[in-house]
Amino acid sequence: MASPALICDTEQWKALQAHVGAIQKTHLRDLMADADRCKAMTAEYEGIFLDYSRQQATGETIDKLLKLAEVAKLKEKIEKMFKGEKINSTENRSVLHVALRAPRDAVINSDGVNVVPEVWSVKDKIKEFSDTFRSGSWVGATGKPLTNVVSVGIGGSFLGPLFVHTALQTDPEAAECAKGRQLRFLANVDPVDVARSIKDLDPETTLVVVVSKTFTTAETMLNARTLKEWIVSSLGPQAVAKHMIAVSTNLKLVKEFGIDPNNAFAFWDWVGGRYSVCSAVGVLPLSLQYGFPIVQKFLEGASSIDNHFYSSSFEKNIPVLLGLLSVWNVSFLGYPARAILPYSQALEKLAPHIQQLSMESNGKGVSIDGIPLPYETGEIDFGEPGTNGQHSFYQLIHQGRVIPCDFIGVVKSQQPVYLKGETVSNHDELMSNFFAQPDALAYGKTPEQLHSEKVPENLIPHKTFKGNRPSLSLLLPTLSANEVGQLLSIYEHRIAVQGFIWGINSFDQWGVELGKSLASQVRKQLHESRMEGKPVEGFNHSTSSLLARYLAVEHESFFLLGVVTAILEML
Ligand code: F6P
């Protein structure tokens, strides 16, 4: 018998649907009273501890989810990914970000060719270049060593590297290696971002890294041209060779842009943009800032989770369990969002990275075979570091909507402080919240409890917490480069698991194209109206009036390439 086209047509999916009623009759308060259940709902790998006992799930739910994984052919799909099969079928590409962090002697084929030697040859080139750069032997146009790096890129060519950079900034070992250096990012095409990214920087001591998989992304290319102009106007055209380098799969366009091909670092079309932080996209700017050995530790962390994901049984496999639970929350319990709540300021850019990783991967409307889906895929990811989030949106999470939460904590702080006379260390203060919040969400507070506390009658409804709000806790031993890599890989694979179960292609992103092409039409109109006075034509009433209103004000700096200068002067 032919297997059903969509996962929702399988018996295993239907069994989970039928199981929802039983789960909805339970309360986390009661589920948490079962210590054996809580003990079973954990997994550990290299000191990373996952506790998912606060999910609205029982052992039976997990069994049913594992059966769903079986019928969804999860194991086979993971193997296909690791073996370089072209699982990104709409772009006819392999999905091999795992090869970017594989050891030198690994064999991973794409199109019958082992890609690992190529990966390592780029990494060796990055190591050599970053050693030269950091030693001060690489000098700029005026003979000075360069200490500042501006990485120009957007989306996957920005968010992953920003996340890792932010996480490493306060790690003592990484910080020591970065002394006297700056790494900044320029992503938004907004000239305000240009101004901010180069504020107080001198082109004489700055290296610009243009990062773009395609080297055609409108925002990145305009920002790259703007920074090129910044360098050239100050140091002359010959300075580009020493002050601009690139990362791309399109080395032809890099050359056409005017960057010396010797200073270009390649990656490959089998690396998706949002999965590219372990390619030169992240490895180059991070090595310039921290040195290659620190970045290698990050890559090894990611690789260790790749091994765990590939070889551990699903019952104890952290990314698999996380992915299955997310499918349970989205598709069966009907929760459309997920909050990412690291109790670590160093992880402040985790949620923005996961927003792209998850929503660009799994926000799809059709199956991998093009069949419209009768169920939703993907979730709305958002988050903030605790405790900041607590003083912002947690009200809604506690008493408004039900949002499954990922609590991420670290046992040992990167920057411990213990003030004499204080009850606890600063990190213990932070972590008190990490431990308390999941229980507050799970247990809530009943009117009976409030009565016993003699709370005035009129406040009882306002102070009642229904509880039964799911979360999971991920506790990392420390947060050095290794754990940052592990965390990244956990989320990458969790998101892939979700896509594999939903039967979608998590590795394309056609949904970003329509807006881009409409922007081209608007760009043309703006040019023709400003340069030739052409009236606004071909848009609907609303867009036409908005454009007319916008065009009615002359842009003073329009004819000057000095937009940046103008804004800088205002700052
Ligand atoms: O707009 C979406 C996207 O294609 C992302 O997937 C990608 O990370 C980003 O644009 C940047 O693309 P590129 O690296 O080619 O400039």
Image (spheres, rainbow, N blue to C red):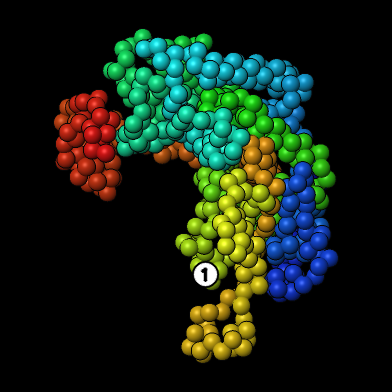
The percent coordinates of residue 571 (x first, y second) are 27, 39
| 443 to 243, vertically: above or below | below
| 482 to 319, vertically: above or below | above
The percent coordinates of residue 177 (x first, y second) are 56, 29
| 51 to 292, vertically: above or below | below
| 153 to 63, vertically: above or below | above
The answer to whether residue 156 of the structure is visible from this angle is: no
Q: Residue at x 81, y 39 (%)?
A: 311
Report which quarter residue 429 is drawn in. bottom right
| 315 lies left or right of 226 | right
Image mark count: 1
Mark 1, secondary structure of its residue:
loop
Q: Residue at x 19, y 35 (%)?
A: 555
Q: Which residue is mark 1?
A: 400
- Seen from the viewer's position, the closer of residues 291 and 18 is 291
- Seen from the viewer's position, the closer of residues 14 and 99 is 99
- Seen from the viewer's position, the closer of residues 503 and 202 is 202
Q: Residue at x 53, y 17 (%)?
A: 135
